[in-house]
Amino acid sequence: MSGMASYHNSSQEEYIPHYLQKEDPFASKLSREADIIAGFYLTIIGILSTLGNGYVIFMSSKRKKKLRPAEIMTVNLAVCDLGISVVGKPFSIISFFCHRWMFGWIGCRWYGWAGFFFGCGSLITMTAVSLDRYLKICHLSYGTWLKRHHAFICLAIIWGYATFWATVPFAGLGSYAPEPFGTSCTLDWWLAQASVAGQAFVLSILFFCLLFPTAVIVFSYVKIILKVKSSTKEVAHYDSRIQNSHILEMKLTKVAMLICAGFLIAWIPYAVVSVWSAFGQPDSVPIQLSVVPTLLAKSAAMYNPIIYQVIDCKFACCRSGGLRAKSSLKKSRTYTISAHRDSTAMNETQLEA
């Protein structure tokens, strides 16, 4: 047994990560043409994300005193997306166009920290939104208890959670390192190939910053879908005020579900490649393939403003249609009442005659 353990430890100690195998870890391993294409792609993503999320924040600031708890969370999500677009993307865009990482190890660690900080903040925000939707729709007694000040307390917890896990690598429990293709940086997933402590670090990050939040999101929306299917007929018998409130809650729920789906679709391929890099065959992921999930994950910040606008347009159309129907109904009722009054008055006149 001791011989097997010593062999396992020696094999871990012999592993040298990709960024230590060559003299220049920041030289691009892609062709210059591929780097230019990736640079233009990230430039477009960065501009759209900055404009879209900036617009969401600006429009929300105009009605900040009327924002519901779920809307406050979606604004926080826009802040996270805007943060990674402004703070992080310029580093990778410049590096792709220059065909190498231009900012050294300090810039690499800063970029890795910012990407993980805002990415973790986004996922935990979506987890909080899913729980809010779950309580609002499946447990009304708890849902009515949630107020704006609870949302701000939740924001403090979210930012504290993201700060803690993004800063843990600087405490000596992990690290940030260049990606295999050289022009971007991320968490050092390859530590899991080198030591048991590295495996513990990577597993902790995967559980607390990916698997657990994703499980909460999936659980919340599965319960919501089941609840909505069983309660749609019941809501139809309520008065218009309750129906309007239900429509608004469902609108917020649709926004949250689409945002979570877009985020997970963008990030799960990157998570799969990262897990394989950590626990699979060392350096078995082709460099040209490893860049694709990274670029897909960087596009996640662009989806949310589009989702907001699509749902808002549909909601506005439905609401305007409902208002037109209500106004026509009111007009028909007014006409009926006035006609009835006119006929009554004529009858009374004839009787007096």
Image (tube, rainbow, N blue to C red):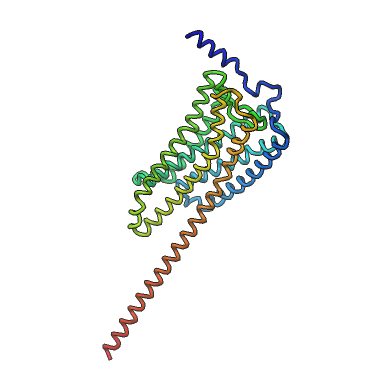
Q: Is residue 206 above or below residue 340?
A: above
Q: Residue at x 61, y 24 (%)?
A: 283
Q: Position of residue 281 (x, y in %)?
A: 57, 23
Q: Residue at x 55, y 44 (%)?
A: 78
Residue 139, by quadrant, is top left
Q: Position of residue 253 (x, y in %)?
A: 44, 47
Direction from residue 206 to residue 291 in the image, left or right = right
Report the label total: 0
Direction from residue 106 to residue 256 in the image, left or right = left
Q: Residue at x 55, y 30 (%)?
A: 166
Q: Nearer the viewer, residue 241 or 205?
A: 205
Q: Residue at x 63, y 29 (%)?
A: 286
Residue 255 visible, this orientation: yes
Q: Nearer the viewer, residue 54 or 205?
A: 205
Q: Residue furthest bottom?
A: 353
Q: Is residue 346 above or below residue 96?
A: below
Q: Position of residue 182 (x, y in %)?
A: 67, 30
Residue 86, by quadrant, is top right
Q: Position of residue 120 (x, y in %)?
A: 53, 35
Q: Is residue 120 above or below residue 136?
A: above
The C terminus, quarter of image: bottom left
Q: Nearer the viewer, residue 231 or 338?
A: 231
